[in-house]
Amino acid sequence: MGCAGCHAPPEFSIDPNSGNNGVIGNLGAPGIDVNNTRSPSLRDIVGTDGTLNGPLMHTGQFRGLQAVIGHYGQINLAPGNTRLDPRLRPNGVGQQLNLTQPEVDAVIAFMRTLTGRNVYTDVRWSDPF
Ligand code: HEC
């Protein structure tokens, strides 16, 4: 499934019907957490200096965009993950993207065009309600 199915333009905000994306670490507790089905906008992940504004996913386990795409390239069907989005398990099999390095680089380059810090500083984004 394409990234934009869940991270929809123009703000690359999350599809309200998204399941989880296979990142099921549980912060501060044993076991897994399959209930994270929301993501912030994919804008401003990378700062204007080209470095990540912060670690990625609810676990903070990814510190680079290459690793994120690697995750989506080989989705793991973890036992107990009852909320993995069906789009990431076509025909019941964990998604295998088989991307070439130039394709990975192109996705990274695209996400880098969404660079900035506006999400953190503009008052228009300060109230989620
Ligand atoms: C089935 C829906 C779905 C698809 C398809 C999907 N994502 Fe996600 N994405 C999510 C969810 C849900 C999260 C939040 C996960 C978390 O925080 O643990 C997320 C988180 C992310 C994050 C981390 C955001 C942050 O601020 O921590 C990045 C980057 C990302 N996705 C990029 C991609 C890319 C690139 C693709 C395509 C290769 C993609 N996503 C496809 C649902 C999806």
Image (cartoon, helix red, strand yellow):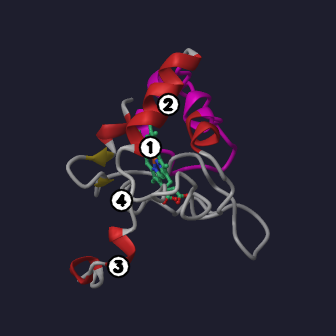
Residue flagged by tag 2: what amino acid is it? Arg
Q: From the Cβ of disc 1, is ligand 1 less than 8 Å away?
A: yes
Q: Secondary structure at mark 2?
A: loop
Magenta range is: 70-97
Give the CA separation, mark 4 to mark 3: 14 Å
Disc 1: CA contacts within 10 A as few (<14), some (14-19) or many (>=20) = some
Of circles 3 and 1, which is in front?
Answer: 3
Q: Locate the N terminus and report the quarter of the image it occupies.
A: top left
Give the CA separation, mark 2 to mark 1: 7 Å
In the rendered image, the vertical position of residue 120 relative to residue 66, given as above or below: below
Between disc 3 and disc 2, whose residue precedes?
2
Q: Which residue is mark 2?
A: 89
Using the image as rendered, state which of residue 114 and residue 56 is in the foreground: 114
Please, what is the dominant secondary structure of the magenta stretch? Answer: loop
Disc 2: CA contacts within 10 A as few (<14), some (14-19) or many (>=20) = some
Q: Secondary structure at mark 1?
A: loop
Q: Secondary structure at mark 3?
A: helix
Residue flagged by tag 3: what amino acid is it? Thr
Q: Is residue 95 left or right of residue 16?
A: right
Between disc 4 and disc 3, whose residue precedes?
4
Circles 4 and 3: CB atoms closer than 8 Å = no
Q: Quick check: is 23 in the magenta stretch?
A: no
Q: From the Cβ of disc 4, is ligand 1 less than 8 Å away?
A: yes
Residue 41: assigned label: 4
